[in-house]
């Protein structure tokens, strides 16, 4: 297909596709799906080989948020039966982080619900970062605390944070329909504050909220312009008890096309498969490894993922390898710039460049469910994620049907007495 040949050539040169080319990827048929994955896989392997970076979420503070992000189980008015707790103590967060590192994670993502941190919160998170780094030499720490005020990014950087996550989530044109308590411009400003402080910026999107193909292309092009180092791609987890509970819009094929489009537009950036992967990709998760070079290990902020061991088995079975702590994730040309204090890879004056930037931390935070990669579900949801294979007396579920049975509220790990999933 000419389109795919063109996109591969551009991806290998870090050249921006046109909007029409990006839209055409989203419009490809299921018959062409494997060709699309193969093409975007060439670009992925050029910049990241067969490595998969594992990231581990620690939800420092869960629920009770005054903001109204429609996708989020932690939002104002949410009746989702998620865990609700206030700030974990540094040693509690460090214990959760250490479990993730033992499971293979090389980045720990510290996420807290809320509009943004107070200076006291920044002090608290700073102590947490120090505790994690003391126990886990060489580990990367990303903070995801919402909208930043002046000077807070610098303080997090001084405390040892490596990265900051704040997602754009959706296009500027549709942002007001998703959230009313802050603006798209607020989000852009926080990402830029993080970059200015020398933090590696992480900013991504949530797909499946009822947006159009044009909206998806808009937000991905906006991300490329913003030039983060990592781009988490969340797939909405429609939590019961939130305004988007009925938005079951994604099929596994659609999710793969979205990931391929992001890879073509952001070829040399850490593209992270974030919240919603188990719910929406289901048995096609391994194909996504040909497109992304980064995933979350184990559970999300407010929902449970598949077992950490299942993540590791999937990576090995698909012929990929977990990226080691001593390996630099980004290609050399981007890593050099990042280490020079610029944050991401190619900030020429005015932004632009080549590409950008998991998990999305906070939708303000990341993963399909609100902040970080929440991913959460309604109270009383049944045990997660794996469907019974081939039960003979069950009818197949139509591809685009609601899969509420695949959504399970997190009941283990941070904020509970049960061990984390890692
Ligand atoms: S995404 Fe973050 S800011 Fe928005 S409602 Fe959820 S916790 Fe609050």
Image: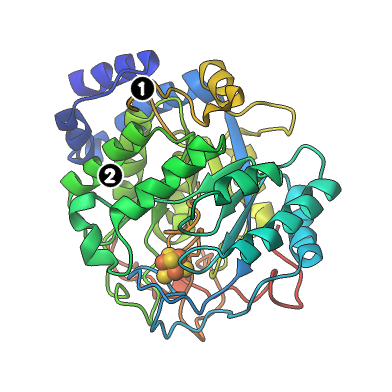
The residue that appears at 66% across and 44% down in the rendered structure is: 161
Quarter of the rendering containing residue 98: bottom right
Say whether disc 1 or disc 2 marks the residue closer to the N-terminus.
2
Residue 126: percent from the left, percent from the top?
Answer: 70, 54
Residue 31: percent from the left, percent from the top?
Answer: 23, 38
State left or right for residue 352 relative to residue 212: right
User: Closer to the camera, 361 or 267?
Assistant: 361
How many numbered discs sit on the rendered protein? 2
Going by the picture, which residue comes out furthest to the right? 135
Residue that numbered label 2 is attached to = 219
Indicate which disc residue 338 carries: none
Residue 341: percent from the left, percent from the top?
Answer: 58, 27
Q: Quadrant of the C terminus?
A: bottom right
145 to 28, vertically: above or below: below
User: Closer to the camera, 157 or 406?
Assistant: 157
Q: Quadrant of the N terminus?
A: top left
Q: Nearer the viewer, mark 1 or mark 2?
A: 1
Indicate which disc residue 349 carries: 1
State left or right for residue 330 relative to residue 371: right
The residue that appears at 75% across and 75% down in the rendered structure is: 418
User: Closer to the camera, 187 or 261?
Assistant: 187
The residue that appears at 50% across and 64% down in the rendered structure is: 374
């Amino acid at each position: 297909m000419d389109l795919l040949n063109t996109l591969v050539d551009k991806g290998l040169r870090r050249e921006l596709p046109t909007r029409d080319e990006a839209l055409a990827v989203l419009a490809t048929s299921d018959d062409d799906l494997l060709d699309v994955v193969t093409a975007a896989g060439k670009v992925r392997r050029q910049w990241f080989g067969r490595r998969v970076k594992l990231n581990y979420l620690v939800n420092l503070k869960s629920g009770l948020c005054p903001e109204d992000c429609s996708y989020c189980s932690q939002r104002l008015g949410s009746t989702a039966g998620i865990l609700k707790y206030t700030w974990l103590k540094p040693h509690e967060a460090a214990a959760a982080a250490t479990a993730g590192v033992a499971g293979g994670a090389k980045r720990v993502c510290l996420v807290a619900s809320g509009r943004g941190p107070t200076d006291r919160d920044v002090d608290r998170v700073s102590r947490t970062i120090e505790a994690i780094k003391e126990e886990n030499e060489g580990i990367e720490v990303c903070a995801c605390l919402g909208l930043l005020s002046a000077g807070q990014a610098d303080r997090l950087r001084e405390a040892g944070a490596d990265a900051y996550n704040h997602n754009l989530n959706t296009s500027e044109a549709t942002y007001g329909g998703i959230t009313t308590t802050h603006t798209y411009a607020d989000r852009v400003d926080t990402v830029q504050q993080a970059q200015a402080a020398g933090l590696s910026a992480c900013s991504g999107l949530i797909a499946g909220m009822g947006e159009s193909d044009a909206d998806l292309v808009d937000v991905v092009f906006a991300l490329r312009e913003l030039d983060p180092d990592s781009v988490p791609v969340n797939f909405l987890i429609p939590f019961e008890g939130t305004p988007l509970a009925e938005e079951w819009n994604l099929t596994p094929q659609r999710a793969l096309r979205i990931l391929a489009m992001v890879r073509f537009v952001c070829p040399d950036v850490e593209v992270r498969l974030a919240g919603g992967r188990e719910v929406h990709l289901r048995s096609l998760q391994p194909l996504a490894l040909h497109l992304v070079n980064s995933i979350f290990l184990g559970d999300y902020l407010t929902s449970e993922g598949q077992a950490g061991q299942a993540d590791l088995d999937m990576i090995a079975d698909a012929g990929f390898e977990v990226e080691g702590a001593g390996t630099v994730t980004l290609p050399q040309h981007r890593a050099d710039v990042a280490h020079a204090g610029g944050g991401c890879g190619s900030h020429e004056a005015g932004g632009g460049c080549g590409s950008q930037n998991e998990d999305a931390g906070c939708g303000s935070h990341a993963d399909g469910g609100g902040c970080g990669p929440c991913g959460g579900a309604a109270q009383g949801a049944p045990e997660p994620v794996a469907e019974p294979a081939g039960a003979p007396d069950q009818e197949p579920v139509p591809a685009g049907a609601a899969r509420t049975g695949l959504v399970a509220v997190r009941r283990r790990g941070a904020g509970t007495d049960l061990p984390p999933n890692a």
